[in-house]
Amino acid sequence: LKNAIRQGKLINQALKEGKDLKDLPPMPSAPVQDDRVPCPHCGRRFNEDVAERHIPRCKDIRAKPKRLVSKRPTYGGVGRRGSRR
Protein backbone atom coordinates (compact mmCIF):
# COMPACT_ATOMS: atom_id res chain seq x y z
CA LEU A 1 0.00 0.00 0.00
CA LYS A 2 2.83 2.36 0.85
CA ASN A 3 4.48 1.70 -2.50
CA ALA A 4 1.22 2.40 -4.33
CA ILE A 5 0.84 5.72 -2.50
CA ARG A 6 4.43 6.70 -3.33
CA GLN A 7 3.91 5.77 -6.98
CA GLY A 8 0.69 7.79 -7.06
CA LYS A 9 2.53 10.84 -5.72
CA LEU A 10 5.22 10.41 -8.40
CA ILE A 11 2.55 10.21 -11.10
CA ASN A 12 0.76 13.33 -9.81
CA GLN A 13 4.05 15.24 -9.64
CA ALA A 14 4.98 14.17 -13.17
CA LEU A 15 1.57 15.23 -14.49
CA LYS A 16 1.85 18.66 -12.82
CA GLU A 17 5.30 19.15 -14.34
CA GLY A 18 4.09 18.01 -17.76
CA LYS A 19 6.44 15.03 -17.94
CA ASP A 20 5.68 11.88 -19.91
CA LEU A 21 4.55 9.01 -17.69
CA LYS A 22 6.63 6.58 -19.74
CA ASP A 23 9.76 8.15 -18.23
CA LEU A 24 8.77 7.16 -14.68
CA PRO A 25 10.38 4.06 -13.16
CA PRO A 26 8.10 1.00 -13.02
CA MET A 27 6.28 0.32 -9.79
CA PRO A 28 8.06 -2.41 -7.79
CA SER A 29 5.87 -5.45 -7.23
CA ALA A 30 5.32 -6.70 -3.71
CA PRO A 31 6.39 -10.28 -3.02
CA VAL A 32 3.45 -12.61 -2.51
CA GLN A 33 3.79 -14.95 0.44
CA ASP A 34 1.61 -18.03 0.14
CA ASP A 35 1.96 -20.36 3.10
CA ARG A 36 -1.04 -22.52 2.26
CA VAL A 37 -0.65 -26.29 1.83
CA PRO A 38 -1.50 -27.72 -1.62
CA CYS A 39 -3.69 -30.80 -1.80
CA PRO A 40 -1.83 -33.54 -3.74
CA HIS A 41 -5.13 -34.89 -5.11
CA CYS A 42 -7.00 -31.83 -6.40
CA GLY A 43 -4.33 -29.12 -6.39
CA ARG A 44 -6.31 -26.69 -4.24
CA ARG A 45 -4.50 -24.81 -1.47
CA PHE A 46 -5.59 -24.71 2.16
CA ASN A 47 -4.56 -23.43 5.56
CA GLU A 48 -2.70 -26.12 7.54
CA ASP A 49 -5.66 -26.92 9.81
CA VAL A 50 -8.09 -27.22 6.93
CA ALA A 51 -5.62 -29.21 4.81
CA GLU A 52 -5.37 -31.84 7.56
CA ARG A 53 -9.13 -32.40 7.27
CA HIS A 54 -9.41 -32.00 3.48
CA ILE A 55 -6.59 -34.20 2.15
CA PRO A 56 -7.81 -37.52 3.67
CA ARG A 57 -11.33 -36.85 2.40
CA CYS A 58 -10.21 -35.71 -1.04
CA LYS A 59 -8.24 -38.88 -1.80
CA ASP A 60 -11.48 -40.93 -1.57
CA ILE A 61 -13.56 -38.68 -3.82
CA ARG A 62 -14.16 -40.39 -7.16
CA ALA A 63 -15.94 -37.67 -9.14
CA LYS A 64 -13.49 -34.78 -9.02
CA PRO A 65 -14.37 -31.94 -11.39
CA LYS A 66 -11.57 -31.14 -13.84
CA ARG A 67 -12.44 -27.45 -13.84
CA LEU A 68 -15.45 -25.29 -13.17
CA VAL A 69 -17.49 -24.48 -16.29
CA SER A 70 -20.46 -22.17 -16.51
CA LYS A 71 -23.63 -24.03 -17.42
CA ARG A 72 -25.31 -20.94 -18.87
CA PRO A 73 -24.75 -20.39 -22.59
CA THR A 74 -23.54 -16.96 -23.57
CA TYR A 75 -25.56 -16.60 -26.81
CA GLY A 76 -22.68 -14.89 -28.56
CA GLY A 77 -22.38 -12.11 -26.00
CA VAL A 78 -26.06 -11.16 -26.18
CA GLY A 79 -28.25 -11.30 -23.07
CA ARG A 80 -31.08 -13.78 -22.54
CA ARG A 81 -33.65 -11.72 -24.38
CA GLY A 82 -31.41 -10.71 -27.25
CA SER A 83 -31.48 -7.17 -28.58
CA ARG A 84 -35.27 -6.84 -28.48
CA ARG A 85 -36.58 -3.50 -27.21
Image (spheres, rainbow, N blue to C red):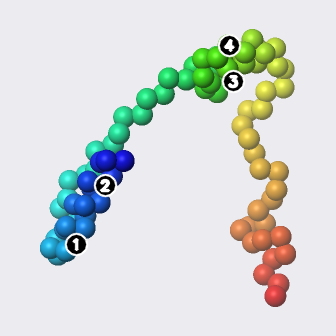
Q: Residue type at mark 4?
A: Glu
User: Of marks 1 and 2, which one's residue comes earlier in the chain?
Assistant: 2
Closer to the camera in the image, 26 or 62: 26
Mark-to-mark CA distance, 1 and 2 = 15 Å
Callout 3 secondary element: loop
User: Of marks 4 and 3, which one's residue comes earlier in the chain?
Assistant: 3
Say which of marks 4 and 3 sits in front. Answer: 4
Instruction: Mark 1: give few (<14), some (14-19) or many (20+) Cα within 10 Å.
Output: few
Please state the horizontal and vertical placement of residue 61, each as a whole percent of the image.
82, 19
Q: Residue type at mark 1?
A: Leu
Q: Which mark is residue 4?
A: none
Where is residue 23, by image quadrant? bottom left
Q: Residue at x 48, y 27 (%)?
A: 34
Mark-to-mark CA distance, 1 and 4 = 52 Å
Q: Which mark is residue 5?
A: 2
Q: Residue at x 81, y 88 (%)?
A: 85
Mark-to-mark CA distance, 4 and 2 = 39 Å
Residue 41 visible to the viewer: no
Closer to the camera in the image, 34 or 61: 34
In the image, is residue 77 above or below residue 47? below
In the image, is residue 12 above or below residue 43? below
Callout 2 secondary element: helix
Label 4, on which residue? 52
Instruction: Mark 4: give few (<14), some (14-19) or many (20+) Cα within 10 Å.
Output: few
Label 1, on which residue? 15
Label 3, on which residue? 42
Residue 67 visible to the viewer: yes
In the image, is residue 41 above or below residue 9? above
User: Of marks 1 and 3, which one's residue comes earlier in the chain?
Assistant: 1
